[in-house]
Image (cartoon, grey):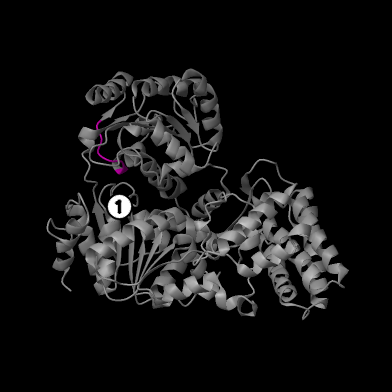
Amino acid sequence: MAVKSVAKCFEPDGELAKAIPQFRPRDAQIDMAKAVETAMKQKTSLVVEAGTGTGKTFAYLVPALRHKGKTIVSTGTKALQEQLFHRDLPTVVDALACGRPIALLKGRSNYLCRYRMNLHLKQADTLLEADLQADLVIVKRWANTSDSGDIGELTELGEDSRIYPYVTSTQDNCLGRDCADYDECYLLKARKKAQEAEVVVINHHLFFADMAIKDTGFGELLPQADTFIFDEAHQLPDVATLYFGTSLSTRQLTDLSKDVEAAYRSEAKDQAQLSKAGSRLSQAAQDLRLCFARDPSKGNWREQLQTPDVQRAIKRLTDDLSFLFDVLKLALGRGKLIDQCWERCSQYINQLKAVCQVEELGNSYWFETTPRHLIMHLTPLDIASRFEDFMGQQHASWVFTSATLKVADGFGHFASQMGIQRTAELGLASPFDYQQQSLLYVPANLPEPGGGQPTTDQFINCIMPLINASRGGVFVLFTSHRMMQLVAAAITEQLTRPVLVQGKSSKRILLDQFVAAGDAVLLATGSFWEGVDVRGDALSCVIIDKLPFGAPDDPLLSARIEDCRRGGGDPFGSIQIPQAVITLKQGAGRLIRSITDRGLLAICDARLASRGYGKTFLQSLPDMPRTRLESKAVAFLQQQLSDND
């Protein structure tokens, strides 16, 4: 098939225009589609930065659907995965009338496990609290009607329901072919469908879980692929590091203790030591979590292991795991669940040993806590060589795309992180007219962070005139939760318009409320910096509190910085600045989402103008007019207001 035929799909009389109302050809979209097809035909690699509004999703889906062979499309999150599969992909399939089989494949924890559901239904009265019993009944009722077993369909329960671990499996507790429900397994059916499909939509976490042989049942899918396409590819380096190391959580240990109790009641009621050993392990895991502060945090695991309290808790945990291992060994052969618990116990003993051998070089040892659990991590600092080797083993084409891959004018940072060699590169500017649609405001009256750190009051005094001048909605994006909470407490009293704060409701609910209000002020951190699409007057101003450099106490970042220094490198220039540039581009990208949008981007950090590296950030942002005068920023917002009257 000629490249020209792909371009014709996007022309005014092409298949897309005929099938999709208001479709308009875009040169950048056509250029990307041509480049993707060339990479697919030649079995080469392609890195594409496609600015907001380029239409990159269609630009890779059209050649993927027209090209013979199997294509795996990986997205950044499950939400984007579902949007791609349920909205974008069917639209293109219908437009091209190609009839190729497609499939959606998620990770194991997204599918109902009938065995675990029935196991807990039998023991619900003795093992589960009343609210969990009620949720379990809802799951059972839904299971009777579900064909896919995808718990994303289970809308009666909230995303944070505590019942999900009881009705889904993990790689640790899955019985595999020994399971009585193996032939009816929803996960197995989803994987079989993915094997038979020609286009499969997954997410980055699932891809790297497979690559790291975390989930061997999915292993045979990847070698069959002819093309791998990664959307939101800027997330790949961070996701990859999670799967190339080792981690162990107190949740895994308490789940094991619960399954041991279930095994004792169902398979070995005469083995009372099982119940005792499981209880001891659960208590030891809880006591280890109590060595840390109540509020969720991250930190250096090496340092924590030097404290006497943690050392004692780890010693007890090690002993109790060994005790449980011995007790389970005596009961081997009594039942499938007992045998499987023994294998998990053996695995956790090895993982605990690995994360506590902190003298190993080339790794970051860090921890994170949730309100109820502790996770201990061993993370390799370099994943480039491993990913490069994996790419070399596959006779496939590779496409990496995102709106934010370049730092200044190059792809070098991303390519070096991923070990991508001999690749074609393509930078496509957004079709939006930023000179006419936007204004970048860097306040001149704020001190620099780090020296005379701007106070909360100074920041509020800087942003309130912008909020008051804006008729539409305002995003205020923060680099820290603490600053967000301080500002939220102060401005809520000063404003009569709705003030929404991340953490008060789910992300989806907050966005729905924001759009419905039309003039709300949303204060948020991390997850709202990307993947948020609010168009029109509902969002007319985005304010960023400061350049999003990684927290200096972030253990993974600290380890990378130290490793770079040991190698004689410049960690600030080669690690910290590029990461901050990518994050800033994501935050700035929330503002202009269509050709009719207009808005103000305010970055309240004097370093953009005063430091030499500020030029790197400015070069990476869209080509917006700039001002340091509050009066011009306010006038721009007021002009928007008068234009809409």
Task: Decide whether the magenta segment is chiefly helix, strand or loop.
Answer: loop
Q: Quadrant of the N terminus?
A: bottom left
Q: Quadrant of residue 469?
A: top left
Q: Quadrant of residue 42?
A: bottom left
**Rendered residue at 43%/56% (across/down):** 76
Name the secondary structure under disc 1: loop
Q: Nearer the viewer, residue 265 or 122?
A: 122
Q: Quadrant of the C terminus?
A: top left
Can residue 362 be seen at all in this image of the molecule? no
Return the residue found at the far left.
Answer: 13
Can residue 74 be seen at all in this image of the molecule? yes
| Image position, residue 622 (x, y; %) | 27, 41
Q: Write down the residue under mark 1.
A: 410
State whether residue 456 is above or below residue 433: above
Give the magenta part as a residue range: 620-625
Q: Is residue 500 magenta?
A: no
| Image position, residue 243 (x, y; %) | 53, 63
**Rendered residue at 84%/71% (across/down):** 269
**Rendered residue at 79%/56% (across/down):** 284
Left or right: 280 in relation to 553: right
Neighbor class of circle 1 (other Cα within 10 Å; few <14, some 14-19, many 20+) is: few
Identify the amino acid type marked 1.
Answer: Gly
State whether residue 238 is above or below residue 108: above
| Image position, residue 133 (x, y; %) | 69, 55
Q: Quadrant of residue 335?
A: bottom right
State whether residue 167 is above or below residue 443: below
Left or right: 500 in relation to 83: right
